Amino acid sequence: MTSTHNRVAVLHGVNFDVLERRDPEVYGGIGLSELERRIELAARELGLETIFFQTNSEGEFAEYLHRAPELADAIVINAGAWTHYSRAIADALELAGLPTVEVHLSDVESRDDWRRVSVFDGLVLAKISGKGPGGYRDALAALAERLGVSGGA
Ligand code: DQA
C-alpha cells in the first residue's frame, strides 16, 4: 500500500466570504472562490491536494482544527482578524499538530500596529504577508518541501 502525505487544508477565517467587497487597494478585489481556484492550481503544480474551509464562526474554526489531523497532512492558515487576538484558535492549531504556514494577503507589518501581533508566533513554519494570492503559492511550496512532495500536474 502506498500512502501519500500531500493533503493541505487551506483555512480562511472571518470576513473571507466577502473578500470581493473588502478594500481592493488592500485585498486585490478578488473573491474567495477565485482565490481558492488560484491556490488549487498552484497546489496541483506542486503535487499537493487541497481542501478548503472558511467560516465566520470562531467555534467552527476551532472545531475544524480539531478534525484537521484526520483530513490533512499540513495547513495553510489565514485566520483574518482572529490572527491578532484569538488564543483559542492558536490553542486549536497547536492541538492539530500539523506543519502550518500562516498567510496574509496584505502586508500586516506595515498596517495598524495591532496587526503586527500574531497568536501563531512559534507555532508556524513561516509567516508570509503582503504578497497577495502569490503568498499562498510560497506557503504551499514550503509545505511541499516539508512533506517531501515534489512535482505534480
Ligand atoms: C488579513 C490581514 C488581517 O489583519 C485582517 O484582519 C484580515 C485579512 C490578510 O489576509 O491580509 O481579515 O489576514
Image (cartoon, helix red, strand yellow):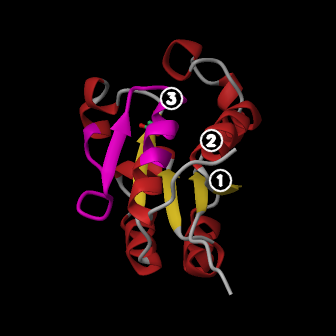
Residue, disc 3: 134
Question: Mark 2 or 3 closer to N-term?
Answer: 2
Give the extent of the magenta segment: 116-141
Question: Mark 2 or 1 closer to N-term?
Answer: 2
Residue 56, numbered label = 1
Image position, residue 117 (x, y; %):
26, 46
Quarter occupied by residue 128: top left
Residue toward you, 24 or 132 = 132
Mark 1 nearby-residue class (10 Å; few <14, some 14–19, many ≥20) = some
Mark 3 nearby-residue class (10 Å; few <14, some 14–19, many ≥20) = some
Residue, disc 2: 45
Closer to viewer: mark 2 or mark 3: 2
The answer to whether the beta carbon of the residue marked 3 is less than 8 Å from any atom of ligand 1 is no
User: Looking at the picture, which amino acid does disc 3 mark?
Assistant: Gly
Viewed as shown, does residue 27 lie left or right of 94? right
User: Looking at the picture, which amino acid does disc 2 mark?
Assistant: Glu
Dots 1, 3 in contact, CB < 8 A: no
Q: Does the magenta stretch include residue 136?
A: yes
SS at mark 3 in the image = helix
Q: How many labels does the image show?
A: 3
Q: Does the magenta stretch include residue 115?
A: no
Is 121 located above or below residue 105 in the figure? Answer: below
Task: Name the quadrant of the N terminus.
Answer: bottom right
Dots 2, 1 in contact, CB < 8 A: no
Is 139 located above or below residue 72 in the figure? Answer: above
Closer to viewer: mark 2 or mark 1: 2
User: Looking at the picture, which amino acid does disc 1 mark?
Assistant: Asn
Residue 46, numbered label = none
Q: Residue at x 65, y 53 (%)?
A: 56
Q: Give the CA separation, mark 2 to mark 3.
A: 14 Å
